[in-house]
Image: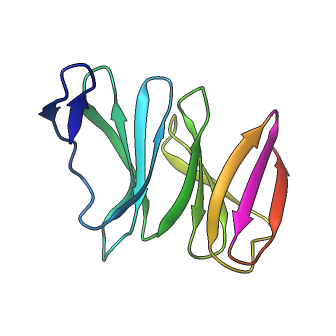
Amino acid sequence: MLWDLISLTNIGSLKAHKDEIRILEKGTNTLVSGGRSMANDSSVFVWDLRSSNPIDELEKHQDIYSMKVMPNDYEIYTGTSNKYVRYLNLKDKSLCSNLEPPHLDTVTSLSVVGNTLISGSRDFNLRFWDI
């Protein structure tokens, strides 16, 4: 549901996931949600905040636990249950790469400091990636 924070009224909803949503990230002009994927469902959805219209569905068959949308609005990093940090490019709507080596368990957190992406996992490790 979308809420007007001044009047505290419901102004609409963005429904896409058929199962749970685990994470929301706001880009400059986008809202990106990540969640659980069942069957052929998408697990990452992107909306244009200026129009509330869906832009795209990405990442079939992945359970997303963490996400980072870069300020340019088209680079997205996701942390998945299959131990990978994945780089998605919204401009050409592609999975560009899995960052190697993977973690040993689910990637539960992502953060960016300068040009470094930091991933945290249930394997009790942090990984630092030069992006």
Residue lying at 50% horizontally and 39% vertically, measured from the top left? 90
Quadrant in the picture for residue 122: bottom right
Q: In this view, does 88 lie to the left or right of 31?
A: right
Where residue 37 appears, x then y in whole percent?
37, 70
Name the quarter where the N terminus is drawn. top left
Residue lying at 50% horizontally and 31% vertically, measured from the top left? 27
Residue lying at 68% horizontally and 79% vertically, measured from the top left? 105
Q: Does the magenta stretch include residue 118?
A: yes
Where residue 114 appears, x then y in whole percent?
81, 33
Where residue 54 appears, x then y in whole percent?
28, 37
Residue lying at 22% horizontally and 32% vertically, measured from the top left? 3
Q: Nearer the viewer, residue 109 or 83?
A: 109
Q: Is residue 67 magenta?
A: no
**In the rendered structure, which segment of residues is drawn in magenta?**
114-121
* Residue 65 vertical placement versus 128 (above, below): below
Where residue 118 appears, x then y in whole percent?
77, 52
* Residue 35 vertical placement versus 103 (above, below): above
Q: Which of 101 and 120 is in front in this view?
A: 120
